Image (spheres, rainbow, N blue to C red):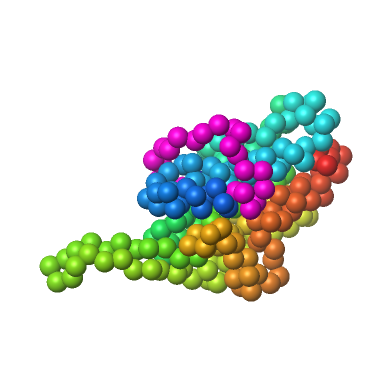
Amino acid sequence: MTDSTLDIPEGSADDRPTTLDETLKKMHELYVQNRVNAVRGQHFIKTLHGYIADQLEARLHPDAVKMGIKVIEEAKILGSHKSKDVDVAVVHPQSGPLVLVGVRSQMSSVGKNVLTYYQDIVGEAVSLQERYPMTVHSYAYLHPYSFIQEHAATKTKPARQQVITPDHTRYAKMYRAIAGRDDKLYRTVSGIYDEFAYLVVDFKKSPALLRDDIVNAASPDTDLSIETFVDRIIDTYKRRNIWLDLFI
């Protein structure tokens, strides 16, 4: 999920990064090449989709693959009221979604839109959890460490640019509040994700710098790091599905 839906050519599967460092490097390249397209386009955030999907697929047990379990990007999943395009899904051919992951980047107008998007992702969790309470529901959200805000010319002021640094501490606390669905009460709790990753990335650095230090300081009691995200998803799945362990 991105700020808008401008399509950008995606390249071949062979171009997909295989590590988090490579993923951030690729996203940095896209951002430097064309900041507007990086903000508005799909290829930028799909780089992160691909990394998460590939990490989950690499952890599937061979027996799970034989059973027909697949990791699907842009999966159409039926929620409580309508279908939703979920960015990454681990799907059983008979039982349906076992793991669902939403991914969003918000690269501009953060202060203006973040609360609206916050409501959206909580509502998405409610809709999907009502239909699939046992599924592991997770979300990854990316903000830039800073971004350039364009100001159009007015009668009294010329056009100008302003560097904005979002209140990452506040946002980390917001996302921490919707992370960590209780292992024993998951059947009755909705609107809270099992696992959440909040990425603050400095795209002005080369290579792009992941600022987990900011997130950790704001949320010391809850792990919101993308580096542990897939491991946390799998650990949650294993605790919840002790009779059907599909991951290695």
Q: Is residue 99 above or below residue 224?
A: above
Please say whether residue 244 is visible from this viewpoint. Answer: yes
Q: Is residue 94 above or below residue 87?
A: above
Instruction: Point out residue 24 in the picture as x, y percentages from the top left corner.
Output: 58, 52
State which quarter of the image contains the C terminus: top right
- The image quadrant that residue 196 belongs to is bottom right
Q: Nearer the viewer, residue 156 or 192?
A: 156
Instruction: Point out residue 233 in the picture as x, y percentages from the top left corner.
Output: 72, 50
- The image quadrant that residue 49 belongs to is top right
Q: Nearer the viewer, residue 96 or 155?
A: 155
Q: Is residue 30 magenta?
A: no
Q: Is residue 21 magenta?
A: yes
Residue at image coords 72%, 37%: 57
Residue at image coords 45%, 35%: 9
Region rendered in magenta:
2-23
For the stretch drawn in magenta, what is the main secondary structure? loop
Q: Is residue 163 left or right of residue 141?
A: left
Q: Is residue 5 left or right of residue 103?
A: left
Kindly give the residue lying farthest to the left in the view shown: 155
Residue at image coords 70%, 43%: 55
Kindly give the residue lying farthest to the right in the view shown: 243
Kindly give the residue lying farthest to the bottom in the view shown: 217
Instruction: Point out residue 126 in the picture as x, y percentages from the top left corner.
Output: 58, 49
Instruction: Point out residue 76 in the picture as x, y percentages from the top left corner.
Output: 56, 33
Q: Is residue 46 above or below residue 122?
A: above
Q: Nearer the viewer, residue 176 or 65?
A: 65
Please say whether residue 124 is visible from this viewpoint. Answer: no
